[in-house]
Amino acid sequence: VVAGDVMIAAGWGMRPGENQTFPNIDDSKKYKATSLQRTELVVADKESDLCSSWITHGQLNTTRQLCVGKGDGNTTCPGDSGGPLSYY
């Protein structure tokens, strides 16, 4: 996998535009997607603006993690953490 490759992220996370603060964790279940969602994300270069701040602040281990995104706001949703990131 190299910069520019397209990855597919999938998950049942909270849909865009929903209230993203929950006074009670059980409330988060109300906002889960009712069908499996997917989005295409592009592997970013480690030197890109998208990745560099994560690396600087120790939030991205480049030996074990990828930095993906389009920079257009298209991303995964809260609740998708740990879901699959596929490459084909």
Image: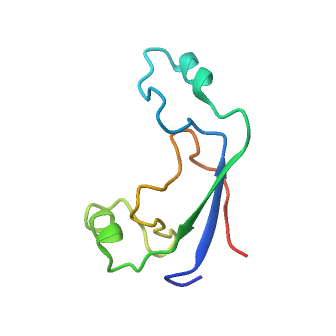
| Quarter in which the C terminus is drawn | bottom right
| Res 61 → quadrant | bottom left
Tell me: 60 left or right of 29.
Answer: left
Describe the colour scheme in one phrase.
rainbow
- The residue at the point 40 percent across, 61 percent down is 72
Tell me: 54 left or right of 13.
Answer: left
Q: Is residue 88 above or below residue 40?
A: below
- The residue at the point 52 percent across, 44 percent down is 77
Residue 8 lies, in percent from the top left, at: 65, 64
| Quarter in which the N terminus is drawn | bottom right
- The residue at the point 43 percent across, 15 percent down is 23
Tell me: 65 left or right of 1.
Answer: left
Q: Is residue 7 above or below residue 24?
A: below
Residue 40 lies, in percent from the top left, at: 59, 64
Residue at the extreme bottom of the image, as rendered: 2
Front in this rendered view, residue 56 or 7: 7
Residue 79 lies, in percent from the top left, at: 56, 38
| Res 2 → quadrant | bottom right
Tell me: 25 left or right of 36.
Answer: left
Front in this rendered view, residue 66 or 78: 78
Residue 31 lies, in percent from the top left, at: 58, 26
Q: Report the label total.
A: 0
Q: Is residue 61 above or below residue 37?
A: below
Q: Is residue 63 above or below residue 20?
A: below
- The residue at the point 61 percent across, 69 percent down is 7
